[in-house]
Amino acid sequence: MITGPVDGIVLDFSGLNFFGTVGLVLLRSFIDDAGRRFIPVVVVGGRTVTRPLELCGMTPYVKTFETVEDAGRALTHDQIGPSTMEFTVAE
């Protein structure tokens, strides 16, 4: 839960070697929570992260970057707004 003032959040998933349905559900919940507070969220990660996002149709709602620096730069320059999404993950 996000409780304080925040201008944007960078989630660094670059060290992951697996990103499955549990991660997708948690990411969705986090982004929904942030979106209700108008807080933009961006994700850093390679193919391990982007492929599941593509398969679930989340790429329009989750902005991904290759580096933390690129993600931070996008937030700093107001290139990213809050996200809201609706999707389902097969159980």
Image (tube, rainbow, N blue to C red):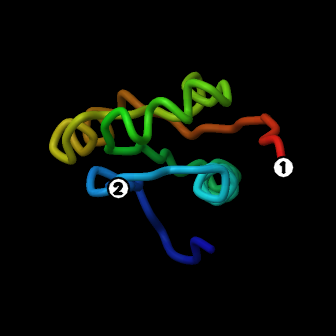
Is 14 rendered above or below residue 88?
below
Residue shown at the point (58%, 22%) measured from the top left = 60
Residue 54, position as x, y percentages in the image: 56, 25
Q: Which residue is mark 2?
A: 16
In the picture as drawn, the residue positioned furthest to the left comes out as 69
Residue 19, position as x, y percentages in the image: 50, 50
Q: Which mark is residue 66?
A: none
- The reply, left or right, for residue 13 in relation to residue 41 is left
Of residues 23 and 43, the one nearer the viewer is: 23
Residue shown at the point (39%, 34%) measured from the top left = 64
Say few, some or many: other residues with alpha carbon within 10 Å of mark 1 (under 14 / 14 to 19 / 20 or more).
few
Residue 41, position as x, y percentages in the image: 47, 47
Of residues 39 and 54, the one nearer the viewer is: 54
Q: Would you identify the image quadrant in which residue 49 lies? A: top left
Amino acid type for the residue under numbered disc 1:
Glu
Q: Secondary structure at mark 1?
A: loop
Of residues 5 and 9, the one nearer the viewer is: 9
Amino acid type for the residue under numbered disc 2:
Leu
Q: Which mark is residue 91?
A: 1
- The reply, left or right, for residue 47 in relation to residue 90 is left
| Residue 62 visible, this angle | yes
Residue shown at the point (56%, 40%) measured from the top left = 82
Is 7 rendered above or below residue 64?
below
| Residue 10 visible, this angle | no
Residue shown at the point (58%, 50%) measured from the top left = 20
Is 28 rendered above or below residue 64?
below
Residue 26, position as x, y percentages in the image: 64, 60
Q: Would you identify the image quadrant in which residue 70 lies? A: top left
Distance Cα–Cα, label 1 vs label 2: 22 Å
